[in-house]
Structure formats: structure tokens, C-alpha cells
Image (tube, helix red, strand yellow):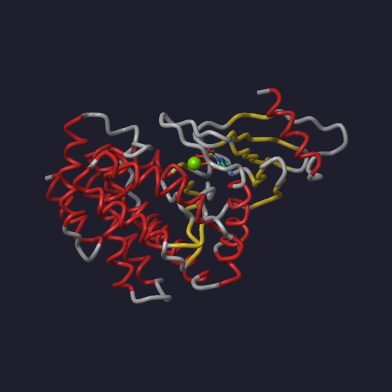
Amino acid sequence: MQAAEDEVLAGLSALGLLQLGERPVLEPLGGGVSSEIWKVSTAAGDLCVKRALARLKVAAVWEAPLERSHFEAEWMRVAGEIRPDNVPELIAEDVKRHLVVMRYLPPKQYRLWKSMLRDGEADVACAVEVGRVLAAIHAATADDPAIARRFPTDAAFHAIRLEPYLEATARVHAEAAPRLMQLSAATAATRRCLVHGDVSPKNMLVGPHGPVILDAECAWFGEPAFDLAFVLNHLLLKCLWTPSASAGFLACFEALWQAYAAGVTWEPPASIDARVAALLPGLMLARIDGKSPVEYITASAQKDKVRGFTIPLLREPVGRPIEIAERWREELA
Ligand SMILES: Nc1ncnc2c1ncn2[C@@H]1O[C@H](COP(=O)(O)OP(=O)(O)O)[C@@H](O)[C@H]1O
Ligand SMILES: [Mg+2]
């Protein structure tokens, strides 16, 4: 641990963020699975420093290249120009040490979306903003070859998203395997927009100017439907975590999707509708039987509910995500 802290202080010093002789305390922040992250109070203000780990802290062995730090910083640069209120402010990057330095967002003003959802707080206005922010980032980067060149992360996206989610799940469910492998290949082959890759409630702080999207380590120039399906999936699964708020979560689902669809400028909304609806059951099943299962669904009856719901949808996909939400509502009733 000491070595890591010395490395961070050396990085901050090299970046010119510390005054001569200044040696701030590093306060570890919990919550991350793929990195070490600290609050560092310096003479120049409160910073948040994130350092990528070679091996993720999840049960299944899962390695991710350290260079993802750089793509996280790049995502902040690009997305921060498009939606400055909804992206953490990047202060500096130490490429060699795999450090990203951001402005620290204090918990008094910035609450984790995941904790709000756990407590049954289904804020439709927040969901609408998430949809708008994602659409704005996708629309502003769509079909832009200069952005595509800055995110040559196809191999990493496969290794840290498509393989552990869709392909690992294919190994567990033989009957759904061809479909899951086809979804993985189709996603990999769709290169249209700057994708965040991990739009999850645990990576979102809700503050005075709306949601702030953290943790862009999976950034990729690729399939925008992935971001939508990823976040919509969380709203479906949260209905099993906090059942009393299910109606609110499904209202958030619909509002998020509509707000996003209103911002789709680069292709007909119906075409992305179909791809989101195709991916959604795959990602949902992946959070039960893939390499990164959600920690809050542990009862086998609940797992079976998700399996029984998603496998028919993989076999016979529907055209629109809202149809999946409707069916899930019936399933939960
Ligand atoms: N700029 C920030 N200000 C304050 N807290 C932050 C900031 N960035 C991240 N965090 C906190 O640290 C946690 C982990 O950060 P994250 O970037 O998601 O790391 P990991 O890649 O390890 O998941 C977040 O859930 C959040 O609570
Ligand atoms: Mg995270």
C-alpha cells in the first residue's frame, strides 16, 4: 500500500499539483473494483486520484490492461467538452503511472445513484438527464473518424465487456449460446459513437447539476446501443433489489429511454431500438450467470426468474426496449 501511495505522490508532484515539500494524506475511497482511488486534499484543492489495478477485485479471474486509465482520461476530455456538468473535471493524467486526477466531488452534494436506487428513490428527472447526456455524447461523436482514432480499444472492450458478460454467459447456457455469441459479434462490429461502456448506477453521482458519469475505463468507439442496454438493465434488476420501488424504476426506464431516443440523430431511432432490445436480455442474464454477477441477487428463485425471463427473449427478440419493461412488470406482478 505504501508503495502505491508513494507512486501517487510522485505522480502528483511530477504533474505540478503539489507545492515544494507538500505531502498530503491519501484518504482511500471505497466502492471501486478495478482501481485504487483516493481523496487527496492539497493546497490547491481537493483532488480525486485513481490508479488502475492490473487485476480486478471480482471473484472470477479477469485482467484488464492498465492503459485503460488513459482511455478513461480521453473519455473525460471528449465527453467533458460535450456535457461539462455531467463529466468529472479532469485535472491531469500521468500516463506512465496510470493515474487519473479529477476534481473531488464531495458526498454532501453528490450522492451515488446506486444508493439512491437501493433506498427506493426512483427519480425520473435524473433518469431523463442520464438519457439526454448519453444521447448528447453519442450524437456529438457519431461517425467521427478523429474520435474513432483516439479510442483504439476494440480488443480491450472485447476482453473487459463482451467476453465476461455475453460470452461467459454463453458458456453457461448452451441453448442461448449461439444467440449470445451473435450479439457479442454484432456489438463488436458496430463502430458508430463514443461509448462509455460502464453506465451503471454505481458509476454515477447525482449532484446539483444532475448526474455525473464516472469510471470511463471501458471507453470505446463502438456500439451506442451497448450503453443504453447496460443502464436500462440495471433499472430492471433493481426491481428485484428494492421491489417496493419497481413501478418507479420502470417509470425511470421508460423516461430514460424516451429522453435518449429524442437525441438520436445519427440513425433512425427504430434501428437502435431494436439493437438495445436485442442486447438487453443478454446483459440481464449476464448479471446472473456471467463473470460479474450483481451482488444483490442471491436467492436461487430470483436468479431463476431472470433466467426464465431472458432466455425466451433471446430466442425471440422484441423490437423495442419498452416491450421488455412491460413484460418485466407482468413478471413481477
Ligand atoms: N471525482 C470523484 N469525486 C468523489 N468521489 C469519486 C470520484 N470519482 C470516483 N469517486 C468514488 O469512488 C468510487 C469508485 O470510482 P470508480 O471510478 O467507479 O472506480 P472503479 O473503476 O474502481 O469502479 C465511486 O463509486 C465514487 O464513490
Ligand atoms: Mg466504478
Residue depicted at x 16% and y 50%:
329
Most extreme residue toward the right, as rendered? 20
| Screen quadrant of the N terminus | top right
Query: Residue 231, position in %: x, y?
Result: 37, 52
Q: How many marks?
A: 0
Query: Residue 115, position in %: x, y?
Result: 40, 38
Viewer-closest of 219 and 200: 219
**In the image, is 153 to the left or to the right of 307?**
right
Query: Residue 180, position in %: x, y?
Result: 29, 51
Viewer-closest of 85 and 321: 321
**In the image, is 278 to the left or to the right of 196?**
left
Residue depicted at x 65% and y 46%:
103
Viewer-closest of 35 and 328: 35
* 20, above or below 149, in the image: above
Query: Residue 131, position in %: x, y?
Result: 40, 61
Residue depicted at x 15% and y 51%:
312
| Screen quadrant of the C terminus | top left
Residue depicted at x 45% and y 49%:
198
